Structure formats: C-alpha cells, structure tokens
Amino acid sequence: MGVSNIFNPASLCLLKSNVRQTQRPIRSFEGNQKGLIMATFSSSPSTVSVEHVNQKLSGDSFIRPHLRKLSPYQPILPFEVLSAKLGRKPEDIIKLDANENPYGPPPEVLEALGSLKFPYIYPDPESRQLRAALAEDSGIESDYILVGCGCDELIDLIMRCVLDRGDKIVDCPPTFTMYEFDAGVNGAQVIKVPRKPDFSLNIEAIAEAVEHEKPKCIFLTSPNNPDGRMQWVKKHDNLIVLRTFSKRAGLAGLRVGYGSFPLSIIEYLWRAKQPYNVSVAAEVAACAALQNPKYLELVKDALIQERDRLFKLLKEVPFLNPYPSYSNFILCEVTSGMDAKKLKDDLSKMGVMVRHYNKKELKGYIRVTAGKPGQTDALMECLRRLS
C-alpha cells in the first residue's frame, strides 16, 4: 500500500513505514517545500512525489500556536539514568522521589508476565478481562469502567472529549501537575484555587470559583483507598472517579489506570480513545495483581506503618517541618534557612532521591515517598549528616 502524487503544498503529512526499507527510494523531499508529507507503507513498493514550491517553512510552523508556548512536563529520572548520573548501581540508590511502591507487585504478576502466550497479537481494545476483574474488585459493573495507559491517559482523554479551546478547568495546587499540563495541551484555561496553609482543599473558594468562572471540569485529588465512591457515578452524571495500579499494586512501570464513569459520558470516551491503549503485558499484570488481594492489603498496611514512622522521624529533623499525610508520601517544608533544592541535590549525591519542584507553591519543600524500613533508615542517616 502506498501514497503517491501528493500535490497540496500547505498540508502537514507524516511518514510511517512498516518495513525497514521500501523497494524504491522516496524522492522529492527538498528543504524548500511548503508541506510535510505523510505516507504509510507496507511491503509493497511505492513512491512519493511532491511538487516543489518556492516558500520554505520551518517544522514548528505546523504546530498549534498554544503548544509552542507549552512548558514540558518535568518527570523524575528512571533508574538506569540515575545509575549512570550518580555512578551507583540501581540497587544502591534509595529512590524516594516518585511515590512508587517499593515492594513491587504480587508474585503472580511476574509469573503471568513470564508465561505470556500471545505478545505478538494486538491487545483487546476493550480490556474485557481486566474490566471484569475490576468490576469484581470494586463492586461496580464493568459497563461503567474504562482502563487506560495510566491515569495520565484518562485525564487527557477526558479533556479531549470535554474541553473546547478556551474552556476553563479548576485546579487546586499544589496537586498532581498533569491536570494543568493536559489542560495546556488541550488549549484550556486553568483557574487555580490554592489549598489552605495545611494543604487541605479550600471548599469555599472552589465553590466561589465555580460560580464565577463556570469551569467545564473540576479536578479534586483524594488519597482515599478503594471504596464505595466508584459507585457514585451511577447517581451523578457529572462525576468521574479515577484510580491507579501504580501505588496499590506496584505496577508503575507498566502504566495501568482505570476509572468509573457515568454511562452518558463513557460512551463518548470509548469512541475517542486509542484502540490498543492498554498493552497485553499491562492487562495480564493487572489481572494477576487482583488475584492476590491479601498481598495488596499486607503491602498497604506495611506502607502505612512505615509512613507513620517516617513522619515521626522527620519531625525530629531541625530543618524540616513535615505535614501529616494519608497517602504514600510526606511533604516537608524546608526551614532554618536551608535551601530545599540544595537539600535535594545533597541527598542525591549520597544516593538518596527525594522530590523537589520548581513551582512557586512548593519551591521551599521536598516530598519523600514512604518506602521500606531500610530506605527510611538510610534517608535519616543522610539527613543527620547534613544537620
């Protein structure tokens, strides 16, 4: 299959090939043309020819104007990059910067991944097995459940389906930064309602913003464990509840998120989502994790216990003011004239990674993930050395 004789000089096109080499070379891709060309190739020979025009354009002229001003998301560095940067083996790095589950998934997950039968077949576009397992786990019917490549994908999908350019969302910083990021990608305006000094939601200010700004979406983050809130979407046509396998099941690297949606909304998300968004490996792993709820509960209890221990220890550090937490991390204000960014950098040189943000709301803070007892001990030893 091929595309040939593309004559529209003002069009944006992409080139995609399913083979390493076409049997004939692609011709006429010169620097002074006014269009980028898209052609899809199979193993059949094909050629592409393009009319020459006199006007030369740069690639960014095809990018939507609001995206040219978009600041990139600031992700954390993966193990292999950290290892090379710090000159340490991955197992020697105390990674407390990304709210990952240090215990990893149940053993059933590794067994299932090791016995994948059909990795060469495209995954089920409806993730039927996983949605059925989630229905049993959560108590809500699978018709209300949609699975994504992490909650990040679902947040973006919701915005793409709901927001027109210029529409508004309400965000409550400091919070999950993907809300603001995806709003920017989709050309929406972000109405920020800052949290209270103790970082709790300012409900009165949110209500006022809704009244005056008339936003299309309101994003609220709650660290509650899986409970009956997923059922609420049956009663409220304007409510969506999102959850992740990253923390609960230790599957951050496989990217699995899910949510419950009103039937009046989920119909359109199904139409707009990418067809093969959840990989075979991700669905198999998530299903296997749900088969061992006892393990998931034991890990949750261990992390809660270690989080509470970590909080007590951090309170003893003279230059830190930790805030109580109901999630798997603790936010700490850096006090006594110490610079939060420098503290983060000094800890990383000792092989301990914590999170620091350049956002103005959190510039003077660090965030520490609740890890294993040995990781807490290593962190505290480094903090004592810096005291």
Image (cartoon, rainbow, N blue to C red):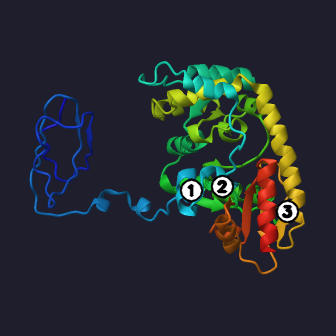
Of the two numbered discs 2 and 3 on the same chain, state the one appearing first in sequence: 2
Q: CA distance from mark 3 to mark 1?
A: 26 Å
Secondary structure category for the residue under label 3: helix
Disc 3 + disc 1, Cβ < 8 Å: no
319 sits to left or right of 143: right
Rendered view: 65 above or below 302: below
Instruction: Name the residue that disc number 1 marks.
Output: 83
Q: Can residue 240 be seen from the camera position used here?
A: no
Amino acid marked by disc 1: Ser
Residue sitting at 22 percent across and 30 percent down?
42
Residue sitting at 84 percent across and 48 percent down?
306
Amino acid marked by disc 3: Leu
Secondary structure category for the residue under label 2: loop
Binning the other alpha carbons within 10 Å of mark 2 as few (below 14), some (14 to 19) or many (20 upward) gives: some
Q: Residue furthest bottom?
A: 337
Instruction: Name the residue that disc number 3 marks.
Output: 314
* The one of 351 and 34 positioned closer to us in this rendering: 351
Q: Position of residue 7 (x, y in %)?
A: 12, 46
Q: CA distance from mark 2 to mark 1?
A: 8 Å
Image quadrant of residue 210? Answer: bottom right
Q: Can residue 213 be seen from the camera position used here?
A: yes
Instruction: Name the residue that disc number 2 marks.
Output: 93
Q: Position of residue 289 (x, y in %)?
A: 68, 27
Amino acid marked by disc 2: Ile
Which numbered tag is attached to residue 139? none
Q: Tell which tag, 3 or 1, sits nearer the viewer.
A: 1
Of the two numbered discs 3 and 1 on the same chain, state the one appearing first in sequence: 1
Rendered view: 167 above or below 318: above
Q: Position of residue 284 (x, y in %)?
A: 58, 25
Disc 2 + disc 1, Cβ < 8 Å: yes
